[in-house]
Amino acid sequence: MRARFILAATAGIALAMPVLAQTGASADFQKFRDVMEEDNPAELFEARGEAYWKTPSGPKHASLEQCDLGLGPGVVAGAYVQMPRYFADVDKVMDAESRVVHCMVTLQGLTYEAVTRQPFSNQSGTPAHVNVVTYVAGQSRNMPIAVPQRHPKEREMYQIGKEIFNFRAGPYDFACATCHGTDGKRIRMQDLPNLTRPEGAIKAVQGWPGYRMTGGLMLTSQWRMNDCFRQQRFPEPKYLSDTVTAILTYQAVNAKGQIYRGPGIKR
Amino acid sequence: MADPMKIRAALQGDVVEVRVLMAHEMETGTRKDASGKVIPAHFIQTVSATHNGNTVFSAHWGPAIAKNPFLQFKFKGGSKGDKVQITWTDNQGDKRTDEATIS
């Protein structure tokens, strides 16, 4: 009788094991990130971005200090956690990265083509606008996400983002929502956040822009979304396209009130 | 010219803990670019730290150290307000010195 009880108990433990192993590994990943975040090389990119922001350059020999990130010309603190937002001067909703590029074009007199020729960091280097976005993001460290939904175009962007999030397509016929629309899912060892709720949605915003240790690259939210579409086997979105802004708006609005911890670190 | 380092130096008890982030490619010299050409080696070879003119840390580095390296060390004898200077030199003759105040 006693032997049978022990057997049954062992079987019970064996069944419970995968769940335990999963939480254990996730906790270890989290510990690893916590340790690395204290001395994150992203800070080096923030410093480069700050220098670029304050140093006159481009055909107009202007700095970015008059750039309006939504809180008035030159106000950087807190701007990142309030984007994407509506900008009256261009009559559209822009995310942080689009806005930085816009400022480089309008204030410094660079051409859009020249700024976006290399949209993302790669082995050949980190584009200036990526450094600037990292600097801007660092100036919102430890602030709550407060992306506005006052203007009709901001609300429209959210609705479009929601539709894209739920849109099933591609050769595998799945949507963002297939993996990121419910609690408790994972792929291999990675827990998949539920992006429809604040505690989950912040995980899509948190850590970006992020320093990827593999290759030592500084990567932005725009890069992350581009890679999501690639993983879904969707057509590649154009850099800074409204599609990406919509999906960023959807995530950031869902993460409202959660604390943004600044540029992050990735494996 | 290389980018500045980020240096933090904090006194804990009688020990100063120094943490340094350096912006450097740390190219090994064994990798090839997209066209198959070897990317020339470019890495930090020596790192040293001084406090009040005394060397409190020195190291020889090689290509096995990661890109944008992070260095942490401790020494005794520092007090709040003192300066700590860090210097690195690389194999291409580039060099950088930055300073931090112990907090």
Image: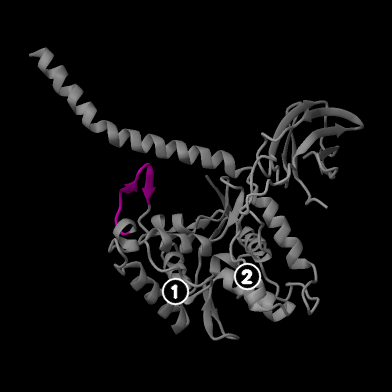
Q: Nearer the viewer, mark 1 or mark 2?
A: 2
User: Which residue is denoted by mark 1 in the rendering?
Assistant: A243
Q: Residue furthest right?
A: B53
- Tell me if residue B22 is in the magenta stretch: no
Q: Which residues are magenta?
A: A181-192
Residue A184 within the segment the image draws in magenta: yes
Name the amino acid type tagged 2: Arg
| CA distance for labels 1 and 2 | 19 Å
Chain containing mark 2 = A
Residue under the image location 70 percent in, 51 percent down: A44
Q: Looking at this view, is A246 or A38 the one in front?
A: A246
Pinpoint the chain carrying mark 1: A
**10 Å crowding of disc 2: few (<14), some (14-19), many (20+):** few
A17 lies above or below B34: above
The image quarter containing residue B26 is top right
Q: Which residue ends up furthest to the front in the rendered image?
A: B36
Q: Position of residue A157 (x, y in %)?
A: 43, 77
Residue at 41% across / 74% down in the picture?
A: A158
List the residue tagged with mark 2.
A117
Q: Are marks 1 and 2 in contact (CB under 8 Å)?
A: no
Q: Earlier in the sequence, mark 1 or mark 2?
A: 2
Can residue A207 be seen?
yes
Give the color scheme: rainbow, by chain, secondary structure or one colour. Answer: one colour
Q: How many marks?
A: 2
> Helix or strand or loop: what does disc 1 sit on?
helix
Residue B47 in the image: x percent, y percent?
80, 34
Question: Could one spot residue A72 in this view of the protein?
Answer: no
